[in-house]
Image: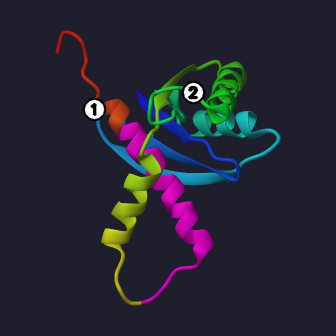
Amino acid sequence: MRILAVDPGSVRVGLALSDEGGSLATPHSTLAAGPGLAGRIAALAGEVDAGSVIVGLPRRLDGSDGPEAESARTLAAEIASASGLTVELWDERFTSAIAERALRDSRPRRGRRGAASRREATDRVAAAVLLQSYLDRPHPGH
């Protein structure tokens, strides 16, 4: 079963998708934040045959929720309603920093991509980092 991961942001939302076996996360795409976002994510989940959705839950370093966490909870509920799929929240602390470092370390020194495409790539990779942490979580009984 494929899993779609959503890394919510105020401007863009990064998306990643797992393989069929649920062991490897791959950056997928970005969507513009705004009205109808949950419906667009639900439609994409159907297109890619996702069996569930993971939404990043932005938490503070001390583990408490800030205002962004409430937005993520609302988005998760809207996606569940629009898609009929199971939607889980997953701690997304440090995913953007990890994604930025990975992209910086993998980028060739020559040539520069535009700032917008770098931000979109970071959002996609952050969603993949989020999803991979979910896929790698300990499973009881295994």
**Most distant residue in the right direction:** 35
Q: Of helix, strand and loop, which mostly describes the magenta segment?
A: helix
Snapshot quadrant of residue 125: bottom left
Numbered circle sitting on residue 35: none
Which residue is rendered at x = 37% and y = 70% of the image?
104
- 74 and 135: which one is in front? 74
Magenta stretch encompasses residue 104: no
Mark in the foreground, 2 or 1: 2
The reply to whether dot 2 and dot 1 touch (C-beta < 8 Å) is no
Instruction: Give the labeled residue for mark 2.
Output: 65
Q: Count the labels in the image.
A: 2
Which residue shows up at 42% across the image and 61% down it?
A: 100
Q: Position of residue 102 (x, y in %)?
A: 34, 61
- Which quadrant, please, contains the C terminus? top left
Kindly state the secondary structure of the residue where label 1 is placed: loop
Residue segment shown in magenta: 111-132
Q: Which residue is mark 1?
A: 136
What's under tag 1, amino acid-wise? Asp
The amino acid type found where label 2 is placed reads Asp
In the image, residue 20 lies at what x, y percent? 36, 34
Q: Is residue 82 above or below residue 110?
A: above
